[in-house]
Amino acid sequence: MVIFLLGNSELRKELYVKSFISEQNCEYRKIFSDEDNKLAELKNASQSLGLFSAKKVYDIVDFDEWPKKEKDEFFNLDFGIKDLTIFVRTEKLGKEAKKSVEGLKTIELEKPKEWEEDKWIGFIVSTGDEIGTPCSKETAEKIFKLTGPDEYAIISELQKLYIYSNGQLDKMTPSEIEDVIYKRTISRLDELGFSITEERFESAYKLIDELVEEYEPVLIVSSLARHFIDLLNITVVAEKKLKFSWPEISEISKITGVQIPKTARYLGFKFKGQTNDPRNHLISYNFKYINNAIKNLYRIDREIKIGGNVRVLLYKFIEDFKSNFIDDFNNSEGGKFYNLNNGQFKEMK
């Protein structure tokens, strides 16, 4: 029997296979695309398991990476033998598979869309029940607020919280959950950029105070510059208008290489249940303004490398940002433009 696990949720595919083999007395083996003899082994298994062989389960984890020739050979194999199960993890099922593989079974395992917060909450609750770490809807909401739509981050933090709370996860307070959950560096540094461009300056000052105690100054400045360079790229690509649909945001993200959640936030997309009104950065900032911010950060990068105080310099950056960089660039650095290469500022020619 061949079971195609379709869709974009790698976590749900993993859990499905684990559940299946836990109910079987079987030999289980994962097969990867870079294995030289994978087809020979599968062909041998399809012909005979042997009189006293146990049930066998093969799990092809990256079928989308197989060359077309190898896929065609796979589709021509006959897996109708009893006690043999082949899982094929793939995003979509091609027409050639439907025509060639007899008796195939398909199971759709999709993640919620990134903006479907209610479905992500349900995903966390149901996944918790499935892996033995049950939690309430209220706790799931707290977890999602801190992890975002990342299924592996969610599962990791759910398990961590369950262990920390000795199985009493729902008794944890929001502040306890926040303290335990691993906050990824990029997310906190991203928040510094948005706190400035969304004009939440008190939050920006507080974040600077926290980050300078935890991270190298060059990393902080580099991440802040990336925030403005991403915004500059979006400004170049996107039409200046008040509202954007999700397909438009997705397309802009694809063109610029800026992650969809960040692109959505730059463009002022309001998610369901969001209490504050987001800011459309294209309405607030023009190309020159953003480029002045990048040049200012380039100067800060040079100063901290010769001993400048990053806290003082970033505080000054915010004050200059508030004043639209009126005095900073009238007679300096002309029309130079900068980009980041491996965290280093490079002048664009």
Image: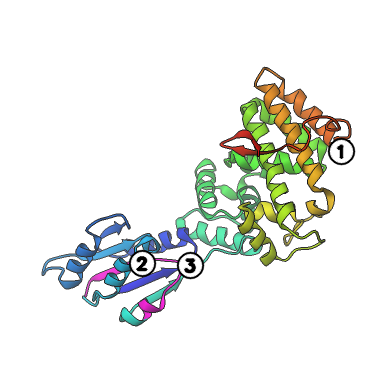
For mark 1, what is the residue? 324
Q: Is residue 141 visible?
A: no
Q: Which residues are magenta?
A: 82-98
| Residue at 72 percent of width and 42 percent of height | 228
Q: Is residue 220 left or right of residue 164?
A: right
Q: Looking at the image, is mark 2 or mark 1 nearer the viewer? A: 1
Camera-side residue: 132 or 283? 283
- On residue 88, the disc is 2
Task: Find the residue positioned furthest to the top.
Answer: 307
Q: Amino acid at mark 3?
A: Gly
Q: Secondary structure at mark 1?
A: loop
- The image quarter containing residue 82 is bottom left
Quarter of the image where the C terminus is located: top right
Task: Find the residue positioned furthest to the front.
Answer: 349
Q: Amino acid at mark 2?
A: Val
240 to 339, vertically: above or below: below
